[in-house]
Image (cartoon, rainbow, N blue to C red):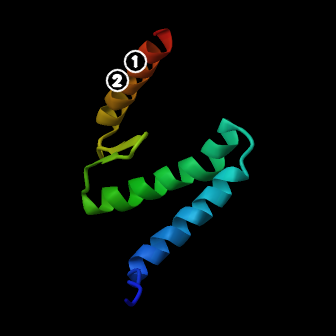
Amino acid sequence: MPKSKKSKGGSEADAFMKDLIQRMDKCDTAESLNDEVLMPFVVALEKVCGARGYVMNIYGETANMVFSGNPQDAETIYQIVEAYLDDQQDE
């Protein structure tokens, strides 16, 4: 039986994920991870999604990411998540 080939997009996504993991692994602290990887990704997400008018709520297995396109909504969502995380620490 012939092996199924991954679509070109899938292999590109895998390569991107591996590169991202390597970049993240090089960051020794949460601050460097934020500065070197996460914030550049967030800024890119904001530029592309904002230009296209996207509103996104991305759900991963253990993480969420929201792009509202609205600074007030972003602050509100941030406060909701912070309150939730604080409550979880108290348990």
Nearer to me, 13 or 71:
13
Height in image: 67 above or below 86?
Answer: below
* Left or right, 90 with reference to 37: left
User: What separation in Å lies between label 1 and label 2 (alpha carbons)?
Assistant: 5 Å
List x then y, in percent, for residue 36: 65, 51
The amino acid sitting under disc 2 is: Ile
As drawn, the residue found furthest toward the top would be 90
Q: Secondary structure at mark 2?
A: helix
Residue name at image x 73 percent, y 52 percent: 26
Residue bearing mark 1: 83
The amino acid sitting under disc 1 is: Ala
Query: Does the residue at mark 1 contact the one at mark 2 (Cβ under 8 Å)?
Result: yes
List x then y, in percent, for residue 88: 44, 17
List x then y, in percent, for residue 24: 64, 52
Residue bearing mark 2: 80
* Left or right, 53 with reference to 42: left
